[in-house]
Amino acid sequence: MKSSGNSGREFQKLVGILGTLRSPGGCPWDRRQDVRSIVDYFLEEAYEAAEACLSGGPDAAAEELGDILMEVVFLARIFEERGRFSVADALGRINRKMVDRHPHVFGGPRAKGARQIVDEWQRRKLREKDRASVLDGVGGNVPALLGAFQIGQRVSACGFDWPDVSGALEKVREEVGELEEAVSTSKRKAVEEELGDLLFALCNVARHVKVNPEIALRRANRKFTGRFKKVEQKLREKGRGPAASTLREMDGIWEDVKGRPR
């Protein structure tokens, strides 16, 4: 493991590498990229980095965080080429912001507790960005599930929340009942609305138990995909696929794949 004292040198090396790749004699593929294309890669890398940090080993986390840094430097390089700002400008802004938002650490009055720190953080964000609402700027450019999670975080920070997870769970049960009632009417608009309310309520449960719902759903998707592929494999061994099999047969294989007794 390299010393943290080498961080600045390694970061400057990365800046230089991206500068070379984007130069007239650099890589044709890198030279063709623009903000939109790199943002797409950035979002993909962000999810991979989150997964590696939560469930991968240190090598995987280090690699994915390095990929994130590369995309950040790549984007900053594109903006610098346009005469907008450099990576040094971006670093300067975040350094000033972190100091300003932590007055209890950098020379200001000491905070009395975590809640006071969060309240002060939100007040400073509103002032810095000239926002009228704590919800301004939330959820617009992220997956809806993550947006709902962020909305809950913002309003909770100003005290609009259940005291514990039991209130959030009760809301889920309430929304399930309303969804069942809407489904019984066969009214698409009502079903859509109640389904959205249920998903939003589940995001509040996730927040209370400190689970990011976007990451949890991605894991569930991956788990289901892996299990279903095994079902397909077992069916292929019998000479057919899912379309030529009964639900009962597939469900039996599914339970075997999960390792549960039927």
Image: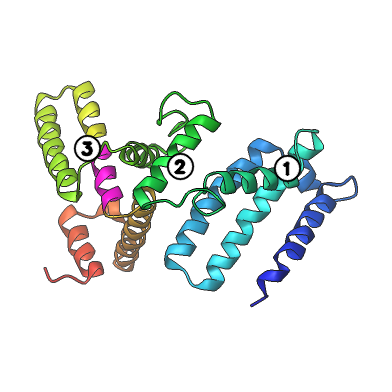
Q: Which mark is residue 139?
A: none
Is residue 141 visible to us here?
Answer: no
Disc 3 and disc 2: Cα gap in Å? 30 Å
Q: Is 199 a magenta residue?
A: yes
The disc, 3 or 2, on the residue closer to the chain's N-terminal end is: 2
Amino acid at circle 3: Leu
The region drawn magenta spans 198-208
Q: Is 27 on the left or on the right of 119, as rendered?
A: right
Nearer mark to the viewer, of 3 and 1: 1
Work out whether residue 20 or residue 124 is closer to the camera in this orientation and state it.
124
Disc 2 and disc 1: Cα gap in Å? 22 Å
Q: Residues within 10 Å of mark 2 (few under 14, many from 20)?
A: some
Nearer mark to the viewer, of 2 and 1: 2
**Pointer 3: what residue?**
198
**Pointer 1: what residue?**
89
Please state, as top left, top right, bottom left or bottom right, where the N terminus lies in the image: bottom right
Please state, as top left, top right, bottom left or bottom right, where the C terminus lies in the image: bottom left
Query: Answer yes or no: do the residues labelled 3 and 2 have beta carbons within 8 Å?
Result: no
Q: Is 215 on the left or on the right of 130, as rendered?
A: left
Q: Secondary structure at mark 2?
A: helix
Disc 3 and disc 1: Cα gap in Å? 43 Å
Q: Which mark is residue 121?
A: 2
Is residue 37 visible to us here?
Answer: yes
Task: Give the quadrant of residue 136.
Answer: top left
